[in-house]
Amino acid sequence: MNTRYLTGLTLVATLGGFLFGFDTAVVNGAEKSLVDLFISKALLPEYQNYALDLITQYRILVSVVFLGVFMIIAGQLIHLLGKRKGFITGFILLIPLTIFIVKYLSAALPEGNDTGAIREITDSIKGFVVSSALVGCIIGAALSGFIARSIGRKKGLILTAFLLSLSAFGAWQPEKLNIFGTLDVFSFMIYRIIGGAGIGFASILSPMYIAEIAPADIRGKLVSWNQFAIISGMVIIYFINYLIARSGNEQWLITDGWRWMFFSGVIPSLLFLTLLFFIPETPRYLMLKNRKSEAFDLIVKISGSIKAPEIQKDIETSLSEKHAPWLAYGYKVIILGLILAVFQQFIGINVVMYYAANIFRNMGLSTDSSLLQTIIVGVINMLFTIIAIFSVDRFGRKPLLITGAFIMALSMFSLGTSFYLKSTGLMALIFMLLYIAGFAMSWGPVAWVILAEIYPNSIRGAVSIPVAGLWISNLIISWTFPMMNDNVWLTEKFNHGFSYWIYGLMCLLALLFVVKFIPETKGKSLEEIEKFWTGK
């Protein structure tokens, strides 16, 4: 085995995972500045026309997003139910969606002096500013299979790097690069959606590339480093955001500082784009395109001439494997995988990842201190992810998920109570870090492990359903957090504690779900897991 060459290829591919974490978490440090620069002024009387334009264009963008997400869901239904049933079901769902969009777009705009109504809408817009990249993630993840088959894994990653580079430039200067004819804040969101598509591609294509070049005996270990790269990207951008925030005062951060946070993504994106031109396509894709001699030469280079014929034969066998309908094993495996993925987001992890600085500011910390705390959050996430990687095969999947859900539920209920009692000191920080540790050692990596194991090879494509569900759930949670956290009535009654109680409840429901429905897959072969769904 050519260890040095294989390590080099893996490191290049894991840059996709690094950018996944980097680009999703960068908004954490910029959220307050974006709101102050683009949104808060809509509440001022002198910006009444701006407020009306903001709300009108927001409604249009949201309607387009709903239609885009519907098309993705409709595509999944066609794969799941077949063309006829899937098309009919999709058409039935389209009717209420169309009615909703028409009513939504035609609803009366709030009066200029109705600041309460405007504030409610701007809270929703705040959430969309932060979560806009996730719209692209949904699209990218849904299209990644088509991209991988049509242009290949390598070219798909090149497209990923290009989109992320374009997004970093556009988010840096959304006013100067506004070619969309929208308000500048929506120019920013569109560039973030473009980058989100790159993240969606990276979330599938980077681990796919590693899995297809890696020898079987070390494949799991190499693929797991992609998850570590994602967390590393988050930690690095938290640190960069902190250094940028310390480079000027609060006003500079609002007008210019946040721009450099997004521009920092240009460096790893362009590095990734450059390095991709020096790596080969995967042997599996080369075989798929009947380029057998190229595939064989690459296998020899990676694994040596002795093992190469056997590896090539295994690839040929896997390519000839029959693909069964997605419902070949019934609805149970599809539904359980989907619910598992939804719970991984509904327990609130990405509220912490994207809004950590906001949460710490609600505790009374300054912007600099808040961003410093997010670095600690990222480091805890990284350390306990490593623990999970090395313990999941020792302790099993279910025990880790159950333990993690219990720790997170306790932490979220305690954090919400701390806010409610206005006791947001050291204990609140400890509850936050305990929650992160609970997630990182369990639901973070382990949910992905189970999703990779429970779908039989013949319906492996059905894993796109929970992946799409995960990204949609991520969007919902990230979008709605400001609506709960900044709502005037909820803040007066619960002092920012309400949303954390909701996430704590989700953690308890996730715990009960795992206890009741998720099978233990530790130590079981894929064939044994398959029998769980067939009842044999």
Image: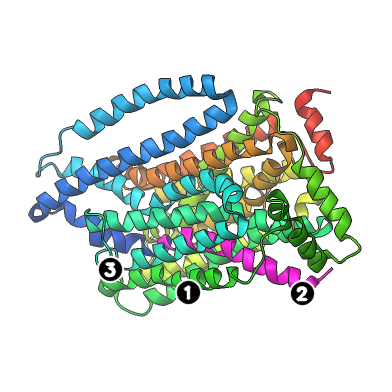
State the residue at coordinates (51%, 58%).
427
Q: Give the alpha-carbon distance from disc 2 to disc 3, as whole Å.
A: 45 Å
- Compared to 458, does 155 lie above or below? below
Nearest to the observer: residue 384 or residue 533: 533
According to the picture, the residue beneath numbered tag 1 turns out to be 267
Q: Secondary structure at mark 2?
A: helix
Q: In the figure, residue 90 lies in which quadrant? A: top left
- Compared to 160, does 172 lie above or below? below
Which amino acid type is marked by label 3? Ile
Which image quarter holds the C terminus? top right
Q: Give the alpha-carbon distance from disc 1 to disc 2, as whole Å.
A: 25 Å
According to the picture, the residue beneath numbered tag 2 turns out to be 4
Which residues lie in the magenta part?
1-27
Question: Do the numbered discs 1 and 3 sit on residues whose CB atoms are within 8 Å?
Answer: no
Whether residue 231 sits left or right of residue 280 in the image: it is left
Which image quarter holds the N terminus? bottom right
Rendered image: mark on residue 254: 3
State the residue at coordinates (75%, 27%).
533
Note whether residue 289 is visible. yes
Instruction: Decide whether the magenta segment is chiefly helix, strand or loop.
Output: helix
Residue 4 falls within the magenta-colored stretch:
yes
